[in-house]
Image: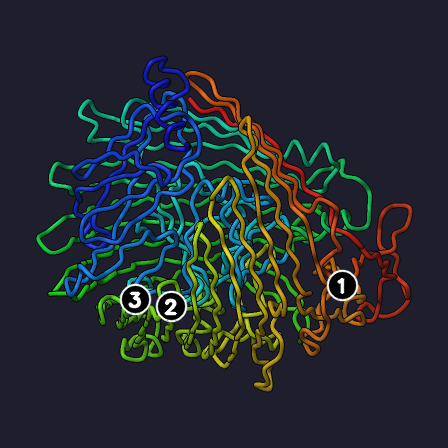
Amino acid sequence: MNQLSLLFALLFASLFSAQTGSININVYDDFSKKPLSATVTVNATDIQFRGDGNVSLSNLPVGVYQFQVSSEGYSEGLLKDIDVLPNQNLSFSVGLTKLSTANIDEVVISKKAYKSTAESPLSLRNITSEEVQKNAGSNRDISKAILSFPGVGTTATFRNDLFIRGGSSAENKFYVDGIEVPVINHFQTQGASGGPKGILTIDFIKDVDFYSGAFPANRNGALSSLFEFNLKQARKDKIGYKGVVGFDDIQLMADGPLSRDQSWSGLFSARKSNLQFLFKAMGLPFLPSYSDATFKISKKFRSGDELYFLGLGALDEFKFNEKANESLYNQTLIERLPVSPQWNYTIGTGYRHLVENGNWLFTWSRNMLDNKSTKYFKNIEIPENLLLDYHSQESENKIRVDRNFRIADYKLSSGAHLNFSNFTNRSFVKTVTQNGPVTDQSDSDLDLFQYGLYLQGAKKLFDNKMEVSAGFRLDASNYSELTNNPLEQFSPRASLRYLFAEQFSFNANAGIYYMLPTYTALGFQQNGNLVNKNTLKYIKNTQVVTGFEFNGKNNLRITLEGYYKKYRNYPFSLRNQISLANIGGDFGVVGTEPLDSRGTGETYAVEVLAQKRTVNDFYGIASYTFGYSKFSDAKGDLLPSSWDSRHILSLTGGKYFKRNWNIGARFRMQSGFPQTPYDINRSELVYNWNITNGPVSDYSQLNTLRGNLVHQLDIRVEKKWIFNKWQLTFYVDVVNVYGSDNPSALPVIGLERDASGNGIIHNPNAPKDEQVYNLHYEQIKRSSPLPYFGFIFEF
C-alpha cells in the first residue's frame, strides 16, 4: 500500500509539477573516494533509481525521506532524514565500505544505520544536520545537540562548554572537511574551547562525526573528543537562498553552481546577532553582539579530483548596559566582567587526488585569534583604576598530507602535518592568588614549530566477522628539550570489532594520546623569559574502551561501553596549587601563569545508549552515564575534578505529525559538579576585593562542595508551510521550560553599599591592609527559562 501511494504521488507530481523536488546522490568508495555504480531505494520500497557515480532522483514529493544506497561488493549505506524541498535540486554524498574478497558470497549484506570505522568501532556517534535542527533545546547548535549522547556534561544552559568523559573543555578538537578549526564558538574562552554561541552554521553541515574516544591516528591533540564536520554539497540546478530570522540572530545563506558546467559550486553564509537588543530590553547587565561568515567554494574535475577553498570568521563585541535592572547579581556582573572584544578566522584549501589504489589529500590552512580584555575598578577609566589590559594573538599555518591506499585486503592510511605558529601576549594583569595579590606585565612573542606523522592499517578476518586495526603517531615541537623528541610522544593504538551474532558485536580500543599545552601556557613570560619553558611537557593520556553493540530492527541501536583514562604531565598552577584540568568553564583566559607538569588524573565510567533514528515518523535517544573524574592536588592525591558529575541522564525524542508539524522534547538530569568554597576572610579585605570585585576561591579546599542536582526539560515545536517554489518554517525552542534549580550551590556575594553606591568598610580606622568590606549574600535558587523562536525561509 505504501509503495502504491508513493508511486501515485510521484505520478501526480510529474503531471502537475507542484510541491516536488529532486536530489542527486554521489556514491563513492568511502576509503578510496572513487565513484561507484549504485542503486538507490526510496524508503525501503521497491522504487529504485540507478546511476554510475551519481544517482539522480527527480520529481520527489516534498517531505522527509530515507534512502538505501547499495553497490555490488559493498556494505549498504543509508541517507537519513533528507528533507526534500519544493522546486529544489539538492546534492548529497554517500561513502560505502568495501567488503572483504574472501567468501564474499556468503556474507549477508545489511544496511548500516549507524556509522563505525575499523579505527573507531566504538565511541563514535554520527549526527545529521536534520537531527541537530530538530533536537529540542539545541537552538540549531551542534554543541548543544550532542548533550543527548552519553559522557557529555555541561555547566550552564547558555554556554557551549563541553566536558566529555571527565576531561576539560581544552581537550576537544574540531575539523571541517579535513581542515582544523580551533575556534568554533563566539566569545571563546582562550586556552579552552567553550563559549555561549556556536559559529558554524548547521545549514551547511551534512553531518558530524563525534568521537568521545578511540581517536584515529590521523588526528593529533584530541584527549576527550574529536569533531569531524562534513559540509554538504551545493545545489546543482541554480543558486538557492535561505534566510533565518530568529530571536537571537539574523542569517542569510546562498548555495549553488558557479559555472555553466556545474563543476564549480559554492556555499555562502552571513549572520548578525540580535542579542544586544534582547538583553537590553530584558534589563540584563551586559550587551553581547556577534557577527560571523562562512564560505566554501569547490571545483569537481572529471577525473574525480576535487579542489576546495574554505573560510569562516567571527567578530564579537561587548559592552555594559547602563540601564540594567538593579540587583545584587547584576551589580556583581557589571563590576567583575571585563570588556572583551574578540575576532578570529580560519581559511584553508584542500585538494583530493584519486589514484589507482586510493587517494591523496593535501590541505593548507591559516587560523588566527585576537583576544582583548579591559577592566577598570568601578568601570571608571582612569590610569590608576586599571586592573586588566590584556591583548594576545594566536596564529597558525598548517600543512597536512594524507594518503589512503590498499595492499591486498589491508586498508592503510599514512600522512604528516607541519604547524608554524606564533603567539603574542602584551598585557597588564592584576589578580589575587592563594599567595596574595599578583601583578603580571607580559610582552611575549613566541614562534613555535610542531610536526607529526602517522600510519594506521585495518583488515577484516573470519568472513568479515572480525575487523582489527592498529596504528601509531609521532608528534614533537621545538618549544623545549622536553618536547622536541618525537619518540617521547609515541602514540600507539589498536582496535577490535567482533560480530559474534547477526546483530551483536564486541568492540574494544586501547591507545595512548598526547596534547601540547595551550599557547597561553607555553607563551607566558616574565622579565623577558618564558617561565614554563623548562617545566611543561606534552600531556599524556592512556585510554582503554570496551563495549557491546546491538543493532535491531527499525533503526534501533543499543550500546554499552566502559572506559578508563589515565592522565600524566597535566599543567599544574604553582600559584593556586591546582591542576588546570579543573579550569575552563567560564569566560576569560586559561594558562597565563607559572606552571609545571606534575598534574595527574584519571576518569572512568560506564555508558549506556539506546538510539532510534526516524522510523514511522518517530525518533529518540536515551543515554545514561555513571562515572568518576579525578585530578591531583598539591600533594599528588586524586580529588574529584570540577567535571566529576557522577550521573548524567538524557532522554530525547520527537515525532513528525500530519500537516508538517514536528514536536520534540529533551529531558536531562545531571549530578551537581564539585565546587570550591570561597575564602571569606581573604575576600572581604578591601585590597583584595578592589582587584577581584568578587569573592576569592579557597583552593586549599578544592572541590569539597557539591553543586545542586540539575534537571531540565527542553521543548521544540516546528511547523512547515510548503509552497510551489519555496518553504517557510516557524520554530519555537524553549530551553529549561520549568526553570530548574541553579546548578551552583555557592551564593552570590556583593558589597553592602552606601547611598552613593560605594562599598561600606566595616573598620575604616584600621590600617589599609586590614580594612574589610561588609558583604551581602544572595542565593539564586532557580535558572531562568530561555525561549528562542524564529522563521526559516528557503527558496
Structural distance between the alpha carbons of marks 2 and 3: 23 Å
In this view, the residue in front, 465 or 290, is 465
Local SS, label 1: loop
Residue type at numbered disc 2: Ser
Is residue 372 shown to the viewer in this render? Answer: no
Q: Which residue is labeled 3 in the image?
A: 217
Quarter of the view holding residue 645: bottom right
Q: Quadrant of the C terminus?
A: top left
Q: Which residue is labeled 1 in the image?
A: 745
Residue type at numbered disc 3: Ala
Q: Quadrant of the N terminus?
A: top left
Q: Which residue is labeled 2 in the image?
A: 505
Is residue 722 shown to the viewer in this render? Answer: yes
Mark 2 or 3, nearer chain start: 3
Q: Residue furthest left?
A: 356
| Left or right placement of residue 276 versus residue 121 in this view | right
Classify 10 as above or below 714: above
Q: Are marks 1 and 2 in contact (CB under 8 Å)?
A: no
Structural distance between the alpha carbons of marks 1 and 2: 43 Å
Residue 512, percent from left and from top: 37, 75
Residue 351, percent from left and from top: 20, 46
In this view, the residue in front, 299 or 613, is 613
Q: Tag count in the figure? A: 3
In this view, the residue in front, 295 or 597, is 295
Local SS, label 3: loop
Local SS, label 2: strand
Q: Which mark is nearer the camera, 1 or 3?
A: 3
| Left or right placement of residue 752 versus residue 791 in this view | right
Residue at the spot x=56%, y=56% of the render? 622
Quarter of the view holding residue 38: top left
